[in-house]
Image (cartoon, rainbow, N blue to C red):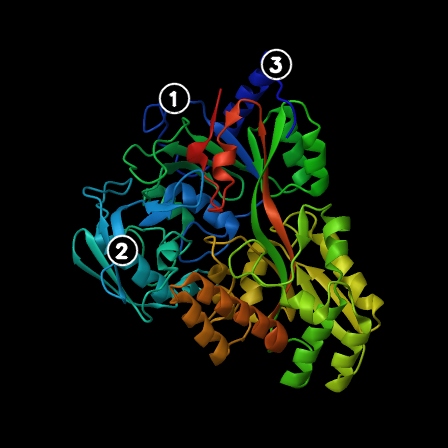
Amino acid sequence: MIARTTRSAGTAAVAAVTLLALTACGSGRTDGGSDGTDGSSGSAGIIIGTTDKLTTLDPAGSYDNGSYHVQTQIFSFLMSFEPGGAELGPDAAEECDFTSDVVYTCTLKEGLTFANGNPLTAESVKFTFDRQLEIADPNGPSSLLANLESVAAPDETTVEFTLKSPNDQTFAQVLASPVGPIVDQATFPADELLDDDAIVDEMATSGPYTITSYGKNELVEFEPYADYTGVQGDVKNEGATLKYYTDSNNLRLDIASGAIDVATRSLTPTDIEALEETDGVNVVTGPGGEIRYVVFNLNTMPGETPEQKLAIRKAFASSIDRAELSEQVYKGTYTPLYSNVPEGLPGAATPFEEIYGADPDVDAATAFLADAGVTTPVALNLQYNPDHYGPSSDQEYNAIKRQLEATGLFTVDLQSTEWVTYAEERTADAYPAYQLGWFPDFPDADNYLTPFFDTDNFLGNHFEDAEVSRLLDAERTEADADARAEILEEIQTLLAEEHLSTVPLLQGAQVAAARDGVTGLEDTLNASFQFRYSVLSKD
C-alpha cells in the first residue's frame, strides 16, 4: 500500500464525466434510477472495472467467479457471510439450524419480496433448490447439493432440508454458496435456464441491488434495493456501475487516471507493481484461497489403458516447476501449490510435494512412463483460457509447455479458447487436458474436494471413485475438528497417489486497487471470497 494522495478537482471532474458516459452506454432495462435514498447512505456511485466475464445471471447455469460476482449483488441467500469477515449470518432467513441429525431447518423473515413485488416465501426457497437439482446444468453448481435428499416447505416461512448423511458440517456454508441464490418461482422456469434479459426486465431478484441497465460483459448498472434486509445491511453508496475490459492494461490505465474507482480481477503482476507506485491509487491484498490447476479428461487424454493414463498424469506432475511459474510468471503473487486444498485451511496437506517433489524430477517421470509401457514422447493437447483467469495465462501455459517438452517425454499442442466457448466445450469432452482455476464458494477444505472428486462432480471429466466418495462423506459429517482434519489429509494423499484427475499448480491472494477516497475494499477482500459492492463508498 502506498501513501494516500488527493485527486485534483480536474481529475474528479473527469471521473464524473466518465460516469455519465458509462451510463449512456448501457443497454437493457433503463426504467429506474436511484435518488440516493433507497437503502443507501448517500455516498456517490461506485464505478468498478473487471476483465472477468459473466456466463449467465441464472444461478442454475453458472459456476464461475465472473457470474457469481454479479449474482452476489442482486440475489439474496438463506445464509450469507457477514461483511468484513467469514462469519455466517442469516440473510433471507431469520435463523437456521439442525432440528434433527438429517434435517436442517430455516425460518424466513416475515414479509420478504422480490424487487418485482412477488412474495419471497419458503416455497420460493424449495423451488430454488429443486430447480438446481432438476436442471443440473454441466456448468452449474448443483454438485454442491450432493448431500441433499429433499426440500419441504411446510408453511410460508419454514424450509426443511433433509440430508442424505447426518450432521453435515458444511451445509450452512453451501446455502451461502453459488448454489444458494433464491429465485422467483413466478418468473424462472423449473426445468430450464432463464435468459439474462428476462431476469433483468422482470426484476426477479431480492439482493442489495437491482440491475437498471444491462449490457452483458460490457456495462452493468446497479441501484440499491430499498427492501433488502439481509446480512449485508444498508448499502453504503448510491449505486454501482460495472465496466468490463478485454485486457488488463486498459483496466490499469483507467484506475490510474481516475476513470474508474475500483479495479478487480484481474490485474497482471506487472500491473500491480505499476499501481503500487501510482499516486492516488491504493492496492489492497486480501486472504489467499484462489487456486490454479490442470484437469485431465480421463476418457480423451493420451494413453491406451487406465494404467497408462495414470502414468502420464504422474509424469506430468513430476515435470512441472511450480516455483518458476510463481516467480517468473506471477512475480510471487501466486505461490506453489502441492495439494488440491490450499495452504492455510484446516486439513491442508502437501502430498504432491512429498510424492513428486518440489522440483522437476525427469528420472521419476521417465520411470512412471516406462513401467506402464507408454511410448514417448507423449503427444498432449493442452488447452487454456486467455480471458477468464487473467492475462498472464498465456505466459503460464507457454512455460508449462516448455517445461514438459524440456524433459523429452512430451510434445505439447497448446491452444486457447475464449471463456464463453471454453465453458461449454470443456464439459463436452473437447479438451484432453485443460486449465481451470477455483475461487472458493466458502472457506473450507471440503469446497476444494467435493465439487471436483465426488460422484457427478462439476469437472465432468469422468472421474469417480467409491473410496474417495466414502471419505468425502465421512469428513463432511465428522464433528470433531482433529478427526476431520485427518480424513481430509487422507483424501488428499489418496488423490495424489492413486488418481491425479487434476494436478494443482498455484495458489494466490485476492488483489484489487482503488482510488483515494474509496473505502470498504478491505471489508470485501476477506475470507468469504465474495466481492460486495454494498460495503464500498467514496468521498
Distance of mark 1 from mark 2, alpha carbons? 36 Å
Q: Position of residue 406 (x, y in %)?
A: 84, 66
Q: Residue furthest left?
A: 155
Looking at the image, tell me whether mark 1 or mark 2 is earlier in sequence order.
Answer: 1
Question: Do we see residue 83 in this rendering?
Answer: yes
Question: Would residue 288 appear left or right of 320 to someone viewing this image?
Answer: left
* Residue 203 picture quarter: top left
Q: Are marks 1 and 2 in contact (CB under 8 Å)?
A: no
Question: Would residue 529 appear left or right of 303 to someone viewing this image?
Answer: left
- The residue type indicated by label 1 comes to Gly
Distance of mark 1 from mark 3, alpha carbons? 22 Å
- The residue type indicated by label 3 comes to Ser
Residue at left 52%, top 48%? 66
Q: Position of residue 520 (x, y in %)?
A: 48, 31
- What residue is pinned by disc 3? 8
The total number of labels drawn is 3
Q: Which mark is residue 97?
A: 2
Q: Nearer the viewer, mark 3 or mark 2?
A: 2
- What residue is pinned by disc 1? 42
